[in-house]
Image: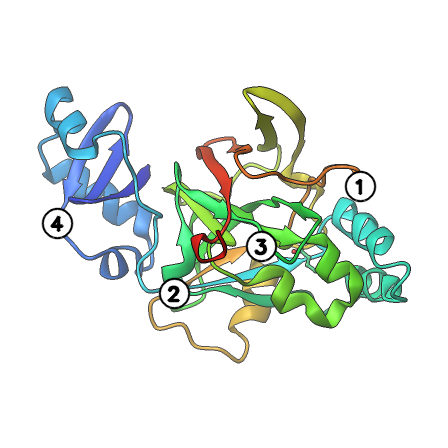
Amino acid sequence: MKLYKIAKGILLEHEGAAYIIDDSWDKLVNRDNLAAYLQAVIDDTTPLTAGVYQEFTNGQVLPPIGTQEVWAAGVTYLKSRDARMEESESSGGATLYDKVYDAPRPELFFKSMPYRVSGHGGEVYIRKDSEWNVPEPELTLYINSKGNIQGYTIGNDMSSRSIEGENALYLPQAKIYEKSAAIGPCLYVTDAPLPADSAIKLLIKRDGAAVYHDETTIARIKRSFTELAGYLYAECDFPQGCYLMTGTCLVPPPTFTLQIGDEVYISIDHIGTMINTIGINSKHN
Ligand code: DO4
Ligand code: MG
């Protein structure tokens, strides 16, 4: 089941039919057994006709988020560990990544307030003071206030490799700025864990042509999703639940940096594809 946030409310899509849900995002998603609740809504609701459906969405979706914070896990895949060890070699920080990959405690960091988050079809920004920038395609969990995973979405943890590589203590500046996070296009709700062989793909286009593409599966993650959620909720309360990006599994080669106008396509099996265009904060233009 897929939940879309649209300008006119919330749209639930399941087996080719669509339903409008009259509720607030926070109230709707923050429950145990969300999948069972949505199934009951379907059983009780008349689906939209195709024309009405088109009229409701107008082809546009908002980020599937209410008032939740967005957090992120790091160095959860070997690919991320290795790329970061390389980029931080001259700063002497390489060993930090090695250690955190193997440590019992994961790297978790605050990523975004909801008002800084972009959605499918929107822009994500690169920083003016950063010369080396990449998208980070990440399976993103929606965890309810009790700490239970209720759904999955696609995340982009935009990152400045030059700023993080200069000094690991600059991580918040490398990671947190306007439109440095995107989630979308929907929240995929299921009562079963996402299959481990689910593919995650990254495609970057420049002037319509592919300049990078690669894919892997979420099975390559070092830690379980419940382990990441457990550490995040250990000493923090999230009254409306929380989104947790689970770390990047794909890193473009060191010669690659994003340019304004690039299009970033991130696809995850069962969820869909999120497309974002690279921009820059207009106050710098
Ligand atoms: O250690 C810095 C951030 C790591 C990260 O964002 C990732 O592995 O996805
Ligand atoms: Mg990341």
Percent of width and height locating residue 242: 43, 63
The picture places residue 172, in percent across and down from the top left corner, at 62, 68
Q: Which residue is mark 4?
A: 22
Nearest to N terminus: mark 1 or mark 4? 4
Q: Quadrant of residue 262?
A: top right
- Label ID, residue 254: 1
Q: Which residue is more in the foreground, 213 or 12?
A: 213
Q: Is residue 103 above or below residue 46?
A: below
- Image x and y of residue 27, in percent: 23, 61
Q: CA distance from mark 2 to mark 4?
A: 20 Å
Q: Nearer the viewer, mark 2 or mark 1?
A: 1
Secondary element under disc 4, as helix, strand or loop, is loop
Q: Quadrant of the N terminus?
A: top left
Label 3 near ligand 1 (CB < 8 Å): no
Q: Nearer the viewer, residue 8 or 161?
A: 161
Q: Can I make out residue 153 in this image? A: no
Residue under label 3: 225
91 vs 168, left or right, is right
Q: CA distance from mark 4 to mark 3?
A: 30 Å
178 on left or right of 18 = right
Mark 2: give few (<14), some (14-19) or many (20+) Cα within 10 Å: many
